[in-house]
Image: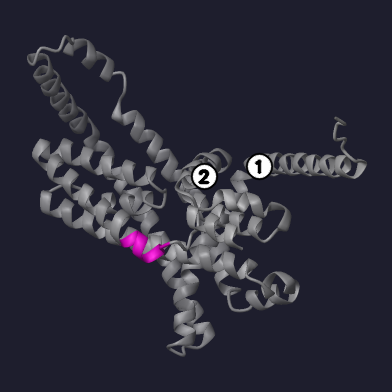
Amino acid sequence: MPFMQATPDNTAQSSGRGHSILLILAAIVVVAAGIREASGILTPILAAAFISMIAILPLALLQGKLGVPRWIALLIVLALTLGGALGIGFYLSQSAAAIKPLLPEYEKRIDELLLTGLEAVKGRGLDIDPDRIMRAAHEWKIADFADVIVLSVAKVLQNLLFVLLVSAFIIAEASSFPAKVRVAFPAAMSGSGLNSVADKVRTFLVVITQLNVVLAVINWVACVAIGVPFAFLLSFLVFFLNYIPTIGAIVASLLVVAIALVTQGWGGALAMAIVQALAGVLIGSVLQPKMLGARLGLSPLVVLLSLVVWGYLLGIAGMFFAVPLTIIVKIVLDSTDDLRSLSVLLGDAAGAREAEKS
């Protein structure tokens, strides 16, 4: 029986596909390395871009529905953006300074709670040495962790002025920039490419911001009702950390419950844990699916892995931008014939079924 032999055309076609795959992988590695090296510059620019995307919405509202002249609307939006950011930065710096003198008292309270818990566990027959565990716990100091947080806040405030300056210029260019893009890239704007990128990223940022505000209000009310100090600060941290999908919500909830435990005891911590669980169900299972639906088109696994990838490339800030950046990557891949298969892999099940039908 004669063997089937590959024709020269098939061999050349397979070799060409292999070379294309290698070139794509090499390009991804080079781009990723460049992003990591330039993370110090890219991170504040990305922050400014995302702040501007949210700030442009009230600008369009003032100019469109309310008929406010462009320059007045621009001044109002810039004043609100700059004033809000500077006010938050000042409040965070003041809060960090106010918390530091209280840390020794909190450490003492943690020791008491930990020792009580260990004694209770030992009383139930578990073979542990509370003194040894306490000595090991004392090697980790809240004050050291607080110093790291203060330094991080100081670094953020240093970049804040640059972020705000870039945001101001982006907002000022908001009305004329789309026209420039349409002239410069008519092919991209004629389809769904750049328009889809802007719409999906803006939708995600607006919806997540609204949901985070709801979470912050719930936490503020709970902190005030239970008697947890620094209610506004904790609520702001909940608002801020929930921009990180899944992990941010877990960290924010544990932080609030831990503060409630240290300041109000086990009863306050239990009450706060119940609030966090109910708020998580309300936001994550009810409001977010209803408000976002399938508009993101990203697989849950991809969302989780994007935190790792963008976190590695851009640091902690990359985790905040992970979902918007992954949306951009997916839409760019979907707009390119050779890379559309990668876009399908990044998408959810509904997107895969739709691609299969087409």
Q: Position of residue 237 (x, y in %)?
A: 33, 49
| Residue 162, position as x, y percentages in the image | 55, 56
Q: Amino acid at mark 1?
A: Ala
Q: Residue furthest right?
A: 8
| Left or right of residue 55: residue 23 | right
Q: Say whether residue 109 is left or right of residue 138.
A: left
Q: Nearer the viewer, residue 262 or 205?
A: 205
Horizontal side, residue 216 vs residue 42: left or right? left
Residue drawn at point x = 44 percent, y = 67 percent = 81
The answer to whether residue 171 is above or below residue 289 is below
Look at the numbered disc 2 and give the secondary structure of its residue: helix
Q: Which residues are magenta?
A: 287-293
Q: Position of residue 239 (x, y in %)?
A: 33, 54
Quadrant containing the N terminus is top right
Q: Is residue 29 above or below residue 235?
A: above
Residue nearest the observer in this picture, 136 or 16: 16
Q: Residue at x 26, y 52 (%)?
A: 281
Q: Tell me, for residue 311, which label it has, or none.
A: none
Q: Position of residue 327 (x, y in %)?
A: 55, 56
Which residue is under mark 1?
32
Can see residue 52?
Answer: no
Q: Is residue 283 magenta?
A: no
Residue that extends furthest to the front in the rendered view of this protein: 1
Query: Dot 2, how many residues are within 10 Å of its Cα: few (below 14), some (14-19), or many (20+)?
Result: many
Which amino acid type is marked by label 2? Ser
Magenta stretch: dominant secondary structure: helix
Report whether residue 22 is seen: yes
Query: Furthest residue to the bottom?
Result: 67
Q: Residues within 10 Å of mark 1 (few under 14, many from 20)?
A: some
Mark 2 = which residue? 306
Residue occupying the point 35% across, 50% down: 92
Considering the numbered disc 1 on the image, is that residue within a helix, a strand or a loop? helix
